[in-house]
Amino acid sequence: MAFAAQFAGVYLNFSPEDAVSRSSKLSAFVAEGMDQQLGWDGNGKLGAVAIQPYDIEVADANNAVVTVAFQTGPRRLHLSVPIYYSTGDAGRRFVVSGWPAILPAPAPAQLPQAAVPETDDAATAELKPQLEGFFRNYASGNTAELQRYVTAGTSLPSFAGAFTFAELKSVVVPVGGATREIEAVVVWIVPGAAASTAPDVAAGSGTADGRLQQAYRLTVEKQGDKWYVDDIRGAGRVVG
C-alpha cells in the first residue's frame, strides 16, 4: 500500500512544465513497455495532497488493486492502482500493472443522535474551577502548579507554553462515584507569528493569535472535598 501511495504522489501531480520530470519519476513505478506518462497528454494541471492508503482488494497471490485517498482543491477523491507483487532472489518487488482510475470518495457517514447522559450538576460546579486551573497549567507547563490538580503519584506531560488557556467551554460530568470519566471542551489560544520574532518581516505584519476549540476525556477522582485529574486523552465523540 505504501508503494501505491508513493506512486500516487507522482501520478496525481502534473503540469506541462514538469512533464519530463514526471515521466522520469513514473518510470520507477510502471511496468516495462507501458506509456511513461500513463495516459496524460501533457496538457492541463492537477495537484494532490493528503495522499494516504485507503483500501486493498486482493485478486490472488500476486495481484491486487490498492485504493489511495487524496485531496485536490476542495474535493476528496480516490485513486485505484493495479499492483503486481513478486518475490525472489531480488526480494519483494512491486510494479504498477495497469491503468489507474480516479473515483469519487464516499460521502461522509450519517452520524446518529447520541444519548445525553444523566449529569451531576453539583459535581460539575465543583469541578469547573479545578479544571480551569488544571488546563491553565497544562498549557503553560508550570509543573509545580500542575501537580496541585492531579492525583498523587500522577505525572502528566504538558504543552510547555505552546498554547495558552483561553476558556473552559463546557464540562459533561455523568453521575457516579468518587472516580468519574468526564468530558471537557477547551479553547486554546494559538500564538501568531509576531513580527518582533522575525527581523526580516515588516513591522505590523505579524499574524494575530488564534483560538482553537478541542475536546478531552478525563479521569477524575474526588479526594476529600476536591477533584483531581488522573488521566487526560482525546474525547472521541462529545455529547452534551
Image: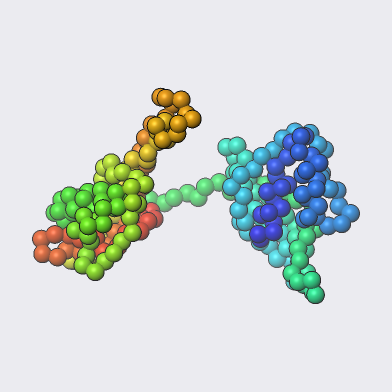
Drawn side of residue 51 relative to residue 161, left or right: right
User: From this viewpoint, which residue is outermost toward the front?
Assistant: 199
Colour scheme in use = rainbow
User: From this viewpoint, which residue is outermost toward the bottom?
Assistant: 89
Q: Residue at x 73, y 40 (%)?
A: 14
Drawn side of residue 14 relative to residue 179, left or right: right
Give 224 or 68, whichever is nearer the viewer. 224
Rendering quarter of residue 6:
bottom right
Q: x, y percentage for residue 87?
A: 77, 72
Q: Is residue 34 placed above or below 150 in the rendered structure? A: above
Q: x, y percentage for residue 96?
A: 77, 57
Q: Residue at x 26, y 66 (%)?
A: 154
Q: Residue at x 60, y 37 (%)?
A: 73
Drawn side of residue 175 relative to residue 239, left or right: left
Residue 110 visible in the shown view? yes
Please state the total of marks drawn on the protein image: 0
User: From this viewpoint, which residue is outermost toward the left?
Assistant: 225
For the N terminus, the image quarter is bottom right
Drawn side of residue 63 relative to residue 181, left or right: right
Q: x, y percentage for residue 50?
A: 59, 47
Q: x, y percentage for residue 124?
A: 18, 53
Q: Residue at x 78, y 43 (%)?
A: 21
Residue 118 visible in the shown view? no
Give 228 or 219, whichever is nearer the viewer. 228
